[in-house]
Amino acid sequence: MQIPAKYVASNVENKWYDYWMKNKYFHSKPDHREPYTIVIPPPNVTGVLHMGHMLNNTIQDVLIRRARLQGKNACWVPGTDHASIATEAKVVAKLKEQGIEKNDLSRDEFLKHAWEWTHQYGGVILEQLKKLGCSCDWDRTKFTMDDDMSEAVIKVFVDLYHKGFIYRGYRMVNWDPEAKTTLSDEEVIHIERTDKLYYVKYKIEGEDGFVTIATTRPETILGDTAVCVNPNDERFTNLIGKNVIVPICNRVVPIIADDYVDIEFGTGCLKITPAHDVNDKEIGDRHQLEVVDVLNEDATLNSFGLHHQGKSREVARTDVAKELLDMGLLVKIEDLTHKVGTSERTKAVIEPRLSDQWFLSMEKLSKPALKAVLEDEEIKLFPKRFNNTYRHWMENIRDWNISRQLRWGQQIPAYYYGDGKEDFVVALSIEEAVKLAQQKTNNPNLNSTDLRQETDVVDTWFSSWLWPISVFDGIRNPNNAEVNYYYPTNDLVTGPDILFFWVARMIIAGYEYKGQKPFSNVYLTGLVRDKQRRKMSKSLGNSPDALKLIEDYGADGVRVGLLLSSAAGNDLMFDEDLCQQGKGFANKIWNAFRLIKGWEVADTSQPESSRVAINWYQSKFQSTLAEIEDHYSKFRLSDALMAMYKLVWDDFASWLLEIVKPGYQQPIDSKTYKDIISILENNLKILHPFMPFLTEEIWQHISERTPDQALIIAQYPLIESFDGQLIADFEMVKEVVSGIRNIRKEKNISFKETIELSVLNNENLASSFDEVIIKLGNISKMEAVDDAVEGALTFRVQSNEYFIPISGAINVEEEIKKITEELNYTEGFLKSVRGKLSNERFVNNAPAQVIEMERKKEADALAKIETLKSSLASLK
């Protein structure tokens, strides 16, 4: 097989992905091996690949490929989430383009359109993940609206209802007027913005006086049913029990007293609108106030809005304020900066709204999940600092509003048989519901036509919280072979923004339905930001096209670029230069491979320099492998990659190959060649999880491989003992070679010209390294001496001194001048360092590591001065 001169990623990526798929390397089924399982955080079915997905899924692929190489039964389950709000919005928009209104369609008709849209556009992101190299078990792809997944959701709903955890309640909820559905508290984000604060006068009934209230929402004045003051506010005690007239609608309402009112805030008088504010609702309940809802579900004003009926809340706000001004009741307008609840999905401003909803009682359910993370540490969060966030959420958990006023989703299995609050049953099927309703009403003649099913669907998270169990059918068939083998899963990779939305809830579900944790480790990635630390977003235009990056830099280049600087839990400052660095690394590896394959092999004896270098690299590899495995155990994938990067770029390509490389037009001995190929293969094995395409391409070029010999399923290197002293000694050898090369460069001595080298070996560096120094330094003669060599250039490595005789080409006077200048500078530097160290204030107050650094500077300067003086003496 001819080896191309350049590595072109686009020429190999599809080839090897198709090969992996054809040979079913990604597919898993239970067997005798240890399972290693990851479930993908299911992206929205509406989604397309963005930088966050790229980072998250690259990390998962690294973990799953490593597990596969380690001989584990690696199973990565992919899938998508039906994303009720986002998907329904897309379908509604598509229908509008066709002149069809959602409300003109029956539920079944709408769902038909939703499924058509999903089949046409959904799942695009999963195909894009293949371009990144993701080795998911595509045969196991799940969708949260699959029949079996939906059955599991309904079964859990019914079970939790009959256990007393799910209830129906009339509560103030978060209403998204754009999506026309409720949201849970966690789906509301609070965004700071500046609004107008309107001061409005309310006339006191039967008097000439007024009370003044301050509001940001004058349109809700039409729903006021009281004005409230603090009973301890002496300014208003005389008003308590009187009435005021609400402007525009002229409703007569009482002035009431409640401790909730802050005397210091605003005017001290609070308008009470129980239908449109949580706190107002609580006050209204305490004082038995009327509830007047002035808004429709789309946040336009209803008939209580009088002549403002049909206007949006924003338009009505402006128009009501103008009307109040014309009536002489608008005292003043100020700017107010405050936080406003906003829908995470649609970005619409949330309306507090009274509504009958379904809730899941969380306090008791959440206790095992709290204990598992914070007490027993059965589940570990990486980085650990997120334990505090988890604790805060779980210890302050509120009941979960699980109903949504949508059609796309699992329809709540509640069946109504009457108009009363309790006139319903919850059942798995209509047949079962009929039986329960007959029992509840004591009416054996009741039939299915007498029942109507709840129109709401469950919150999307109520399906995805079952994900690690339901993808293995563990809800419908709790003890099936697959769930017993793959569950609990091993590692979860996700973002901290859904630590409560999804992670905590999966843990809750895991203990409730399997009696055990859903996973052992949660690796929380950071956000991908741009170089200016801004979050990537379409609106800012700072989010690169993920597929274009792969096209430009290759999937491996992009993977390396992303992971070079993505420490667990820390935001990644994405810079396209990182992908260029990744591409450069791929080219470096390819060129090293081409160099090796270009050598002619002969059955000759192995040079001592090659033997020593190979022994060193094998120890260095084992030392680095131990370091890499430690990084993996702590989910420091960026550090693991950097350790590999240095090993392969510096130690392998720059040092080992230079040492063993045969002379011009000379063959390499077969023993060294065989060892180098073995070393290269081990390098490919540890690199494969990060750079799957490049490594498989090189692996298959090295020799003819059958499918059972592919790199993707090769044996990962095992950690073995290594010679730490050999590694340390070789670092010294590197410094010696660098010292020789520096002198050659400074003195303009050609690298083709051989030179002699004498060494004052105070460190007792083994003579076995001499051949390496001789080869890389192009030394004609190397000998040990007992004293400094006169008339020679010199440099020091630790306490060893090295001497290179001066050739006639060197200008001695210029050399003396140059060394004298460097000596004077170094002595001045030493004086300034010692000045710091003799300053008691500095020594007493500086951190220990700073003091240590200054002492090292002092030692280095002293050693350099000694070397420079020795060089000067040899020249004079």
Image (cartoon, rainbow, N blue to C red):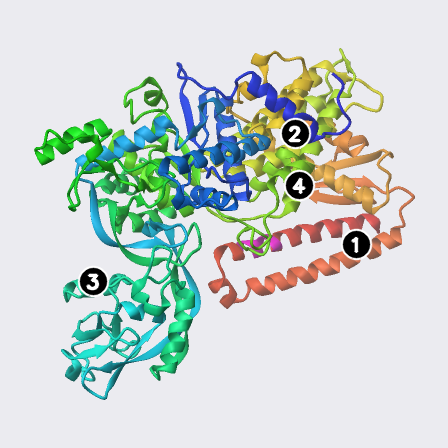
- Separation of marks 3 and 2 at Cα, in angstroms: 84 Å
Residue at 16% across, 77% down:
231
Across and down, in percent, residue 590 comes to 70, 28
| Magenta span contains residue 785 | no
- Separation of marks 1 and 2 at Cα, in angstroms: 31 Å
Across and down, in percent, residue 359 comes to 24, 45
| Residues drawn in magenta | 852-857
**Residue that mark 3 sits on:** 282
- 800 lies left or right of 230: right
Which residue of the protein is positioned furthest toward the bottom in this rendering?
208
Amino acid on which the number 4 mark rests in the picture: Gln
**Residue that mark 1 sits on:** 819
Q: Nearer the viewer, mark 3 or mark 1?
A: 3
**Residue that mark 4 sits on:** 581
Sequence order check: which comes first, mark 4 or mark 3?
3
Q: Secondary structure at mark 1?
A: helix
Which residue of the protein is positioned furthest toward the right in this rendering?
808
**Residue that mark 2 sits on:** 766
Q: Nearer the viewer, mark 2 or mark 4?
A: 4
